[in-house]
Amino acid sequence: MNSVITEPLSTPSSLKWVNSFARLGPDFYTELQPSPLPSPYWVSRNSVLARELGLDPNWFESPAALELFTGNRVAIGSQPLASVYSGHQFGQWAGQLGDGRAILLGEMDAANGPLEIQLKGAGATPYSRMGDGRAVLRSSIREYLCSEAMHGLGIPTTRALCVTGSDAKVRREEIETAAVVTRTSPSFIRFGHFEHFSYSDQHEQLKTLADYVIDRFYPACRDTAQPYASLLQAVSERTAHLMAAWQAVGFCHGVMNTDNMSILGLTVDYGPFQFLDAFDPGHICNHSDPQGRYAYNKQPNIAYWNLFCLGQALLPLMDTQDQALAALESYKTVFPQALEGRMRAKLGLPDARPEDKALIENTFKLLAADKVDYSIFWRRLNHFNSPQGLEAVRDLFLDRPAFDAWSLQYSERITPVDIGLKTDLMLKNNPKYVLRNHLGEQAIRAAKLNDFSEVDTLLAVLQAPFDEHPGRDGLAGFPPDWAASIEISCSS
């Protein structure tokens, strides 16, 4: 660890700490202080989230806030800690893991319920496994922007309050500079937390953790005959809805290990993620995944595999294995229904019909055959009913006869649909802006030169991705040729 934290920091009365996770006891975490960084500076502040949290704007821009969210000072009333968990990584049991570069400050008593405040990159912990516990500027910016982009898209996610930077050097593939991203979530508990106590035969702690999650986040499960099986079912269904949202928007997570899966069905841990450019069902966004375990089209099955691991971890709390298997079955029903519902909305179909499944499948096949730009196709499809709009969509395809055949099938389906209703539905489900890799890369390159304006511009656009944002059309265009050479790995 680096230099010692000075005296505790007083924070506004709106920033009240409740620290319920800390009350679980020392088996669940290690108390520690963040490691200060020299001469910190603001990279970007999420004023939208700060307002939602009720933070005083003047304080949020103050040197005291900068010190707190860099980890240079600790707030009075907070209880910094790093939690322990285990997990499966790339399909293999990895044993004990834990918060290797994340430190939970505590929970803020926010308007919509307590939110955990966590610093990512605030120094080494007992779970860093020979790492330095630091985050670098590029990865911090990517997580900051993408978590807010996902929130803007209506996809469950952790969120980021701010990024601070320092000129302190950090060694990765090359020498980079340090940064800290402040993350918020109702909880950062993962599947791996349950695996840790189950695999180490700490069944009392496993029950304590499960009871905490049920009582705090899934209270309806408590009133059932089998509360722990009900918990598994509830998590399975939330995860199914999350996977449907990812697939519909063309999001690739890149590293769906069990320690990166939220017990609340949130998108968590933004590392080698990517929003699809050209539609390729087998696209691999993680340069560290040469076998393609976490390819785009494999994500739904991987989520089920991870849920199966969670079910195994919860078995000591259940009477029979059949209870766990029955709870997992809901995923197989909920995911396809949720995905079909989201794709119908993207197609502008307010009601469900038997032929919709075939239309959706044919749409995916059509896009894959010509590797059509995924986001631009859906946004242009909003205007399919006009001659100009139809041609704009048709221009995306090389195989015009294949498109014309699909177009006929689609036209027959939407003929009885109210055009105004259809267009409104599509505009709310087909974003104009997503965080493409090249946009993030451009913002990062500018930030490395101490120009953070592109980070703030992207943040503002991604917080409202369905709006037009006049003058920002360049952020919604085709990726440049060099974008295909961007490689994102687990170290990102």
Image (cartoon, helix red, strand yellow):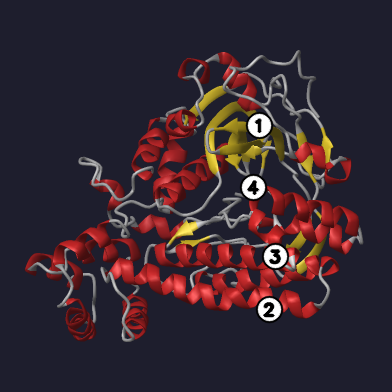
Say which element carries label 2: helix
Taking 34 as reference, is 39 above or below it? above
First in sequence: mark 4 vs mark 3? 4
Identity, as a three-letter code, of the amino acid under mark 2 = Ala
Residues under labels 2 and 1: Cα distance?
51 Å
Q: Which residue is mark 4?
A: 173
- In the displayed structure, 446 sits above or below 377; it is above
For label 3, the SS is: loop
Q: Nearer the viewer, mark 4 or mark 3?
A: 3
Counting residues from the start of the chain, the first of labels 2 and 1 encountered is: 1
From the viewer's perspective, tell me whether residue 300 is left or right of residue 6: left
58 relative to 248, above or below: above
Which amino acid is tagged 1? Lys
Separation of marks 4 and 1 at Cα, in angstroms: 12 Å
Sequence order check, earlier mark of 4 and 2: 4
Could you tell me how far apart the alpha carbons at marks 4 and 2 are, in whole angstroms? 45 Å
* Disc 3: which residue: 224
Say above or below: 102 vs 154: above
Amino acid tagged 4: Glu
**Marks 2 and 3, how far apart at CA:** 15 Å
User: In the structure shown, which secondary structural element does the residue marked by tag 4 occupy?
Assistant: loop
Q: Determine the image quadrant of residue 120.
A: top right
Q: Position of residue 166 (x, y in %)?
A: 60, 26
Residue 301, can we see it?
yes
Which amino acid, by three-letter code, is at mark 3? Answer: Thr
- Nearest the camera: 345 or 98? 345
- Residue on which disc 2 sits: 326
- Residue 132 vs residue 171, the one in the foreground: 132
At which x and y percent is residue 206?
Answer: 83, 57
CA separation in Å, label 4 and label 3: 51 Å
- Label 1 belongs to which residue? 169
